Amino acid sequence: MSADAIVQKYSTSLFAAGEDNKNAEQLASELLQINKIFSQSDVLAFFNSPFNTNDNKVMVAKSALEGKCSPETFNFMIKLVQNERVAFLSQISDSLQGLIRAKSGETDGVLSVAGEVSAEFKSQVEEKLSKQLNKKVKLTVQKDPSLLSGYKISVAGWVFDDSAELHLNKIKEEILKRGI
């Protein structure tokens, strides 16, 4: 089974448990906090070590989590440890966050830029995209050294390109068409 399939399977199952009990957001929040602890290098080394028995790993997870999270999250984490899937915890947490945002009509995207952008510009772009896509769009700004100027936006399977490269290519095509 591929890593993406594993992540999807586990995040979907926890999301379904949360939807059944109407506490999906709480489960996602708990998983986010647990991920911060379980992603520390020494903790990951313990759970990924072939020298620690599965029973030892389960015992440590139970003692660390018992009474500190909801029963659904506790059982989910124990199942992750038993199935040796702790390495996927960060991706599962991200996927679960995405499922919750999708349910509430939100979507994430990436705003790739050549240089710095103001918070005002980012919020204007988010607002325009939200109206176009009929979803609340939340963008993450990422510097792209391949861009000379302008920006590209990737959101909900779409790419919006307003880069210098695109405009230069359009000018080039126009010149070639006219035979100048």
Image: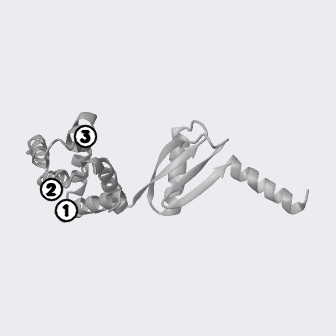
Check disc 1 and report its element: helix, strand or loop. Answer: helix
Residue extending furthest toward the front: 51
Image: 5 above or below 37: below
- Residue found 27% across the figure and 49% down from its top: 89
Q: Are marks 1 and 3 in contact (CB under 8 Å)?
A: no
Whole-number angstrom distance, CA of label 2 to CA of label 1: 7 Å
Q: Are marks 3 and 2 in contact (CB under 8 Å)?
A: no
Q: Which mark is residue 141?
A: none
Q: Which mark is residue 17?
A: 1
Residue 150 location (% of width, % of height): 64, 45
Check disc 3 and report its element: helix, strand or loop. Answer: helix
- Residue found 27% across the figure and 45% down from its top: 32
Q: Say few, some or many: other residues with alpha carbon within 10 Å of mark 3 (under 14 / 14 to 19 / 20 or more).
A: some
Q: Say few, some or many: other residues with alpha carbon within 10 Å of mark 1 (under 14 / 14 to 19 / 20 or more).
A: some
Q: Is 138 on the left-hand or right-hand side of 99?
A: right
- Residue found 8% across the figure and 42% down from its top: 63
Image: 135 above or below 73: below
Instruction: Name the kind of residue labelled 3 in the image.
Output: Leu
For marks 2 and 1 on the same chain, the one whose residue lies earlier in the sequence: 1
Residue 161 location (% of width, % of height): 62, 54
Q: Which residue is mark 3?
A: 44
Viewer-side label of 1, 3? 3
Q: Is 162 on the left-hand or right-hand side of 70?
A: right
Instruction: Name the kind of residue labelled 2 in the image.
Output: Glu
Residue 136 location (% of width, % of height): 43, 56
Q: Are marks 2 and 1 in contact (CB under 8 Å)?
A: yes
